[in-house]
Amino acid sequence: LLGYIGIDTIIEQMRKKTMKTGFDFNIMVVGHSGLGKSTLVNTLFKSQVSRKSAGWARDEKIPKTVDIKSVSHVIEEGGVKMKLTIVDTPGFGDQINNDNCILLPWPHAPWFHWEPISKYINEQYEKFLKEEVNITRKKRIPDTRVHCCLYFISPTGHSLRQLDVEFMKRLSHSVNIIPVIAKSDTMTVEEKQEFKQRVRKELEMNGIEFYPQKEFDDDMEDKSDNDKIREAMPFAVVGSDKEYQVNGKRVLGRKTAWGIVEEPTNHRSLCALARLLPRSHLQDLKEVTHNIHYETYRARRLNENGG
Ligand code: GDP
Ligand code: MG
């Protein structure tokens, strides 16, 4: 899915700008446990990597994620290199089960849930800052900063969980958030439309700024382009972990009561996500990360030191 989408168009778009230097793009997946984050990461790299057989067993079961873990894949074509990294995170709830210690669940200790993720994001800013202020600084600073955070929302059809609201509110100040509806194959088209609308309303009511943030619309044209994207949000995603035989072809997909959801072509919303990420907005996500989120972090840090 994300991977499938991306490569050709990403390369096409980036060629002009980064002919020699190459570039990094980092995506982080966040959300409650069991929503298919690891599956999505796996799907992406499996579809990309399996041809070269990078050691993924065909029907390997995805273990529960207990640490923040990143997987990178360098794509090189026509002399342009892109290092795509996906940062997988433990779902909320996972840590609680795995620690063998009793921790109070939400809402008693909300910090417990976002602290490790927040920490990871800030650590990458810190790393970049250190390189930047270094006298003998590298010609090109390796960029591990999270350019985009896919926030997985449970496909309940009801409202957002309070934890999701709090979490996104927090995170939106330090990273670009793209909310997605997890396991969207479990909802009908109508349910999805209704749920999307409800989620958008709740995000707005709670003052959560997701990407593309309204406050950064440059002009009317920008605004009308971005409005279209905002109206399609949250994107619906489906992760697939198995290969199926469809019309004599082996495809990555997910078997449902209605048949096999083939990746990635059958999913409109997914294509929207695809279009959003690589095409027009990949560079923009990087720029917002650098000019807004990183800058905010940097200003705060320099204040601490100089003040
Ligand atoms: P994580 O905790 O968010 O990393 O979730 P996992 O990727 O470990 O997936 C949890 C379970 O959900 C697994 O049994 C997956 O096969 C299943 N799953 C993952 N993605 C989807 C999806 O898009 N649709 C459906 N119906 N199930 C999914
Ligand atoms: Mg996981």
Image (spheres, rainbow, N blue to C red):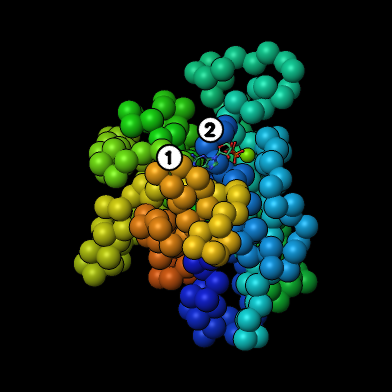
* Residue 294 left/right relative to 55: left
**Helix, strand, or loop for circle 2?**
loop
* Mark 1: amino acid: Ala
Please give the label number shown on residue 257.
1
Q: Quadrant of ligand 2?
A: top right
Q: Where residue 11 sits in the image (x, y, percent)?
A: 54, 78
Residue found at x 27% / y 52%:
231
The reply to whether residue 13 is in sight is yes
The image shows residue 101 at horizontal and vertical percentages of 72, 15
Residues at discs 2 and 1 in contact (Cβ within 8 Å): no
- The answer to which quarter of the image holds residue 192 is top left
Q: Please give the residue where the numbered disc 2 appears in the rendered image.
A: 32
Q: Where is residue 282 in the image (x, y as percent from the top left)?
A: 48, 66
Q: Is 47 situated left or right of 60 in this image?
A: left
Classify residue 294 as left or right of residue 22.
left
Disc 2 to disc 1, C-alpha distance:
25 Å
Question: Which callout, 2 or 1, points to the residue nearer the camera?
Answer: 1
